[in-house]
Amino acid sequence: MKKLSFAIGFFAFAFCSVNAQTEQTDTVKAKIFDSNEAEKLYNSGVSNITSKNFDAAITDFNQAITIKPDFDKAYANRGLAKFEKKDFQGAIADYNKTIELNPNADNVNFNRAQARYALKDIDGALGDYNIDLQKNPNHAQAYYYRGCIKFDKVDYKGAIEDYTSAIAAKPDYAYAYNDRGSAKRQLEDIVGAMLDYDKATQLDAKMAFAWNNLGSAKRKKGQAKEAILDYTRAIQQKSDYYIAYNNRGSAKFDIGDYEGAIKDFTEALKIKPDYAYALNNRSAAKFKTKDYAGSVDDATAAIKLNPDYGYAYLNRGNSKEMLRDEMGSCSDWNKAATLGVANAKPYLSDCQ
């Protein structure tokens, strides 16, 4: 009986063992199938991001995460898709989850910094750029954007250091050269700024704002004719660049080409009718051509756009004087002086 009992027990045990193995195998197969399906959805999501089909990408990543809740790469890339849709809060939530699942995930701190920067969480962005650079000391973009934050914080020396590090990591980084030039210009290193702007245009001849900045640096050095050429290059690259038209008009004004200046200011105003600077500048140029009534009209339009525009009051006062409107001119000069325009004060000596 003992032998029979043993045999029955043995076969019963063997039978249970076979069932357990079958269930375990099926579970493994299911997991493999799920993992493969999640990967397929993930790859589809990445492809949709590349094609800029961000809604479809998010749907793919949602499904991948449902199948595989710890899929850190799916969270990271869903964050990218949400960022492109300007859902910055949603992107940050996905980056947070990515970091929770994989603290060493590539670029996730940088990407979260970009989203925080977009939401004007400057300190949060700065912290993430710092972490990213600790992980990847040669990340040119992280240096560049951290430099931008320092620039905004008026830490121009710190900005220059970061732009320089960005250039060291990426020698053809045209944006970093341009922005380093702007930081140098803030520190009155005009020659250094010119060299950086020039390098930026060499690296990317289509970078309109670098040509504009180069022109402004040259104008500040008294090289108005050379500046006009650079502003022209900026306009050639960007036909609706009203700032470059205004700046080229100012350079033409500097060399006494008042009619040319008026044409450029007018072009700027065709593109941006509410551009108070161009209206005031055209007012000054019209004064030089003795179109005093036109000068008053332009200055008045500038003041309507910006009631605290001191130089527009000064220009209007000058033109009113030429039109024999003494009370009007004195009133405008007084207003200009009140608004801090030192050049207006000498004119007030003629006012009763």
Image: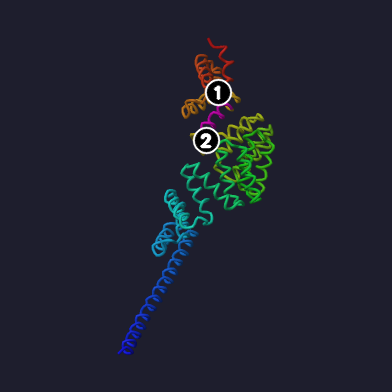
Q: How crowded is mark 2: few (under 14 residues within 10 Å), some or many (20 or more)?
A: many
> Is residue 282 rendered magenta in the image?
yes
> Is residue 233 rendered magenta in the image?
no
The three-letter code of the residue at mark 1 reads Asn
> Of helix, strand and loop, which one carries label 1?
helix
Question: CA gap, disc 1 to disc 2?
Answer: 18 Å
The residue nearer to you, when weighing 147 against 280, is 147
Going 55% across and 17% down the picture, which residue do you hit?
321
The numbered disc on residue 269 is 2
The numbered disc on residue 170 is none
Using residue 1 as the reference point, say whether residue 70 is left or right of it: right
Image coloring type: rainbow
Q: Report which quarter residue 225 is drawn in.
A: top right
Going 50% across and 28% down the picture, which residue do you hit?
302
Q: Magenta segment, which residues?
A: 275-284
Q: Mark 1 points at which residue?
A: 315
> Of helix, strand and loop, which one carries label 2?
helix
Q: Position of residue 326 (x, y in %)?
A: 52, 14
Q: Position of residue 325 (x, y in %)?
A: 51, 16
The three-letter code of the residue at mark 2 reads Leu
Q: Earlier in the sequence, mark 1 or mark 2?
A: 2
Going 64% across and 47% down the picture, which residue do you hit?
165
The residue nearer to you, when weighing 218 against 15, is 15
Check the image and report above or below for 110 versus 212: below
Q: Position of residue 80 (x, y in %)?
A: 47, 54
Q: Residues within 10 Å of mark 1 (few under 14, many from 20)?
A: many
Which residue in the rendered view is the most extreme toward the left?
Answer: 1
